[in-house]
Amino acid sequence: PVGVMMALFSVSTTSCAADPATDAVKNLSDFLFTVVRLVGITMLLFGIVQMGISRKGHDPSQRAAGILTVLGGLVITFSKEIIDLITGGI
């Protein structure tokens, strides 16, 4: 009887109801990553425009700045996926 009682108490049960605090943190995180993604897309587009202007004006320094802006925009746009890849999707 004691073994049965210990087995019953050691079995973990999962709750069907979600924790409101966890949901709030997840919603806030999703919102912040959406804002960050919009900033990244804006930087990406600005870098593309900057590279286009540099080709017209034959300005290599502006072209380099445009390439760096595009690369930075890509990193910022996919920051959530990069963090998930590094942390293993915790």
Image (cartoon, rainbow, N blue to C red):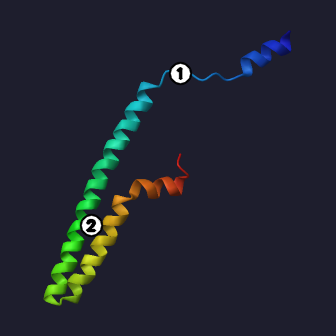
46 versus 87 height, above or below: below
Mark 2 surroundings: few (<14), some (14-19) or many (≥20) residues within 10 A: many
Relative vertical location of residue 90 with respect to residue 7 in this rendering, above or below: below
| Quarter residue 77 falls in | bottom left
Q: Which mark is residue 16?
A: 1
Residue 44, numbered circle: 2
User: Callout 1, which amino acid?
Assistant: Cys
- Left or right of 6, for residue 30: left
- Residue 75 drawn above or below residue 48: above
Q: Residue at x 30, y 65 (%)?
A: 73
Viewer-closest of 82 and 55: 55
Give the crowd class for mark 1: few <14, some 14-19, many >=20 residues within 10 Å.
Answer: few
Residue drawn where x is 71% and y is 22% of the image: 11
Asked whether the beta carbons under mark 1 and mark 2 sit within 8 Å of each other, the answer is no
User: Which picture quadrant has residue 14?
Assistant: top right
Residue 2 on image: x %, y %: 84, 11
Q: Secondary structure at mark 1?
A: loop
Write down the quadrant of residue 68 in the picture. bottom left
Cα gap from disc 1 to disc 2, whole angstroms: 42 Å
